[in-house]
Amino acid sequence: MERATRTVAVWIALSAMGIALAPILWFPFLGTRAYPGQHMVNVLAGVMLGPLSSLVVPFVVGTVRIALGLGTVFAYPGGLPGALMVGLFHRYLTSRFSRPELRFLSALAEPVGTVLIGGTVSLLVIGPLIGSEPLMNLLRGRGPVGALLVFWSGWAVSSVPGALLGYVLCLALSRALPERFFEPRA
């Protein structure tokens, strides 16, 4: 029961952090609302909760942002793949390192999930499905490859700084609370 309670507590804390920062840290980009705070929280969730359990946090944050008018439907493909990728990279690759500087490099997988996977799904699937005029104009004007490069670069402006901030927070938390969080796996 202790593990389940800890998981729920981390879901609540990280979701609350993501929601609290939402009105402050977003910027508009081609019909989306880019939010670096989501990517920071994704890194913490992926490292602390693992790949599947971490998906709760971007889902809750995205849903509340949409309900408050601070996000769009793109919050889901912009958040879920990043948390999943961090969790997978942390669980299967970087958690084996004993040095925190290496152990938390899984943070760099967040932009891979958000930009490459989420950005592609957003531009080529969700945008056309909902008839997003800015995205449709981008696709018509530049073609799929050119549009992807523009869209990916815009989402990277949000994802990369958020992931780097998440990396720094992981390092700080591992130093401040070494016995409580982020213990290396055997």
Image (cartoon, rainbow, N blue to C red):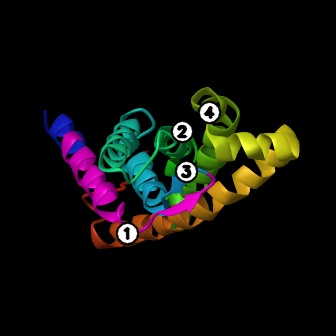
Residue, x 54% and y 60% (percent of image)?
28
Q: Amino acid at mark 4?
A: Gly
Q: Which residue is mark 2?
A: 77
SS type, badge 3:
strand
Camera sees residue 185: no
- Measure the alpha-carbon separation of dots 1 and 3: 16 Å
Quarter of the rendering containing residue 40: bottom left
Q: Which mark is residue 32?
A: 3
Q: Which label sits on residue 24?
A: 1
Q: Is residue 66 left or right of residue 177?
A: right
Callout 4–callout 2 Cβ contact below 8 Å:
no
Residue 54 in the image: state x and y as whole percent.
39, 40
**Foreground tag (1 vs 3):** 3
**Label 1 or label 4, whichever comes before in sequence order:** 1
Q: Which residues are magenta?
A: 8-30
Q: Which residue is mark 4?
A: 131
> Residue 32: percent from the left, percent from the top?
55, 50
Residue located at (21% from left, 38% from top): 3
- The alpha-carbon separation of the residues under discs 2 and 3 comes to 11 Å
Q: Is residue 143 left or right of residue 67?
A: right
